[in-house]
Image (tube, rainbow, N blue to C red):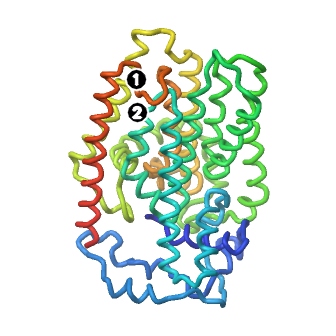
């Protein structure tokens, strides 16, 4: 996946106890890692953006003999050193154990991938199992090739998406007819705090509980937003600010200058948004569904079309019961706040990339990838009507069976297509 070597470097740093990274110069941040940690160029770099090339097994065999070096040297990975350590912890513990048992570097990376995909699937499965709204939608989202690919990588993104689906599933269980304990709210707050320090735009999704019409003390509904905001401030102070460097320095990118430009040209933002979406919306949709490798391994166009049709059909299927049974509907306030929070989080992703990755005053936002929106998408599940029967996708048993059959067919096609695309791309 893109930047996977730098994610692996961050995992190794955390496994050594380096929860907060280091800044060597104003343009260089990272940490002191084993001297023989593979560079980006050593990790099949000749395949990057060359779909016609295949894996050279001799290159992998050479790397497979490389054990962890005790000697350390400075390693730069400025784009991942700023990330909070929480969602990296399973991989970091795995790396620590692998190094203690004398596993090679490549073996360690395989173990990290295995642990990450197991946890990703577990969190996604648990979130789907406990959901009482949008269960079919969350199931489809969990099964996208991009989610599986990220889960089986050395990045934190798979676990992050799984936790987002789990959090959304917990939110869908909040029923106006039941009292919710303070411990439940604190648990939700802890999950939102983890999501926020891992992906700050998700702070905006922590506002959704404020709009849910629930019995009991209204102040407790602010616990997720309060804990998220506090966690963001703490990591901003101790982890992000001390290690943040200027990305693409010397290429016209400047955080401070871009913020100043936005403040002095506020009416230009709609034009920037329009040009970005008009040029790259199709790319964002494809990347959201799955563009693998170094964003150079694509699926057939018919596969993307099938997924888009399935997403629309799933949304309509899940919303249909609300037309006939008003008591199952989500409140209008909760629907609008959920959609508004999701849209604001999406806008925050675009704005952050405009500031840190785009030349000052550029008419199009650079650096945005569709996968960035995967942890935000689960919170759309809050708009769907309630399904009172546990384990059901919809109230009608026959409709449930039809949906399960369609989901089974989709998963089969999804799996076969994924295997074929990866095999033909790399082997």
Q: Residue at x 36, y 41 (%)?
A: 278
Q: Is residue 235 visible?
A: yes
Q: Quadrant of the C terminus?
A: bottom left
Between 79 and 64, the one lying in front of the other is 64
Give the structural element (helix, strand or loop) at label 1.
Answer: loop
Indicate the quadrant where residue 88 lies: bottom right
Give left or right: position of 427 versus 256. Answer: left
The reply, left or right, for residue 367 in relation to residue 396 is right
Is residue 358 visible from the viewing direction of this image? no
The residue nearer to you, when weighing 345 against 130, is: 130
Numbered label attached to residue 394: 1
What residue appears at the point 72 percent right and 71 percent down from the top-left corner? 18
In the image, residue 351 lies at what x, y percent? Answer: 56, 45
Q: Earlier in the sequence, mark 1 or mark 2?
A: 2
Image location of residue 188, percent across then percent down: 68, 37
Which residue is at a point 31% across and 30% down the rendered structure image?
403
Q: Residue at x 35, y 24 (%)?
A: 316
Q: Check the image and report above or below for 153 versus 70.
A: above
Quadrant in the picture for residue 205: top right
Q: Position of residue 388 (x, y in %)?
A: 50, 20
**Count of marks, rendered view:** 2
Name the spot of residue 282 as percent of width and height, x first. Answer: 33, 44
Nearer the observer, 255 or 305: 305
Q: Is residue 60 left or right of residue 260?
A: left
1 and 2 marks in contact (CB < 8 Å): yes
Relative to 164, is 149 above or below? below
Classed neighbour count for the residue bearing mark 1: other residues with Cα under 10 Å, few (<14), some (14–19), many (≥20): many
Residue 136 disc label: 2
């Amino acid at each position: 996946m893109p930047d996977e070597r730098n994610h692996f470097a961050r995992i190794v740093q955390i496994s050594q106890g380096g929860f907060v990274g280091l800044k060597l110069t104003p343009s260089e941040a990272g940490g002191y890692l084993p001297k023989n940690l593979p560079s980006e160029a050593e990790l099949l770099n000749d395949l990057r953006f060359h779909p016609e090339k295949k894996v050279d097994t001799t290159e992998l065999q050479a790397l497979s003999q490389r054990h962890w070096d005790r000697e350390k040297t400075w390693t730069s990975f400025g784009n991942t050193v700023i990330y909070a350590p929480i969602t990296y912890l399973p991989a970091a513990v795995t790396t620590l154990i692998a190094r203690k048992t004398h596993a090679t570097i490549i073996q360690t990376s395989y173990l990290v991938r295995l642990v990450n995909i197991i946890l990703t699937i577990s969190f996604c499965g648990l979130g789907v199992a406990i959901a009482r709204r949008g269960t079919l939608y969350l199931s489809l989202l969990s099964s996208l090739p991009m989610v599986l690919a990220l889960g089986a990588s050395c990045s934190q993104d798979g676990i992050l998406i799984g936790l987002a689906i789990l959090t959304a599933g917990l939110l869908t269980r909040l029923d106006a007819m039941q009292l919710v304990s303070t411990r439940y709210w604190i648990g939700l707050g802890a999950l939102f705090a983890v999501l926020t320090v891992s992906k700050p735009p998700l702070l905006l999704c922590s506002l959704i509980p404020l709009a849910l019409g629930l019995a009991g003390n209204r102040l407790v509904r602010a616990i997720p937003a309060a804990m998220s905001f506090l966690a963001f401030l703490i990591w901003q102070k101790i982890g992000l600010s001390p290690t943040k460097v200027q990305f693409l320095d010397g290429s016209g990118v400047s955080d401070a200058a871009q913020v100043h430009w936005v403040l002095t040209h506020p009416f230009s933002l709609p034009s920037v948004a329009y040009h970005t979406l008009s040029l790259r919306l199709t790319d964002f949709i494809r990347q959201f569904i799955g563009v693998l490798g170094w964003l150079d391994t694509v699926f057939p166009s018919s596969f993307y079309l099938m997924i888009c049709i399935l997403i629309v059909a799933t949304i309509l299927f899940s919303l249909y019961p609300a037309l006939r049974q008003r008591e199952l509907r989500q409140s209008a306030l909760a629907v609008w706040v959920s959609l508004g929070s999701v849209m604001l989080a999406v806008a925050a992703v675009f704005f952050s990339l405009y500031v840190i990755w785009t030349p000052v005053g550029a008419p199009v936002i650079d650096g945005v990838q569709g996968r960035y929106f995967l942890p935000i998408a689960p919170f759309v599940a809050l708009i769907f009507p309630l399904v009172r029967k546990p384990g059901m996708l919809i109230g009608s048993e026959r409709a449930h069976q039809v949906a399960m059959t369609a989901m089974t067919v989709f998963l089969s096609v999804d799996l076969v297509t994924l295997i074929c695309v990866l095999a033909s791309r790399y082997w």
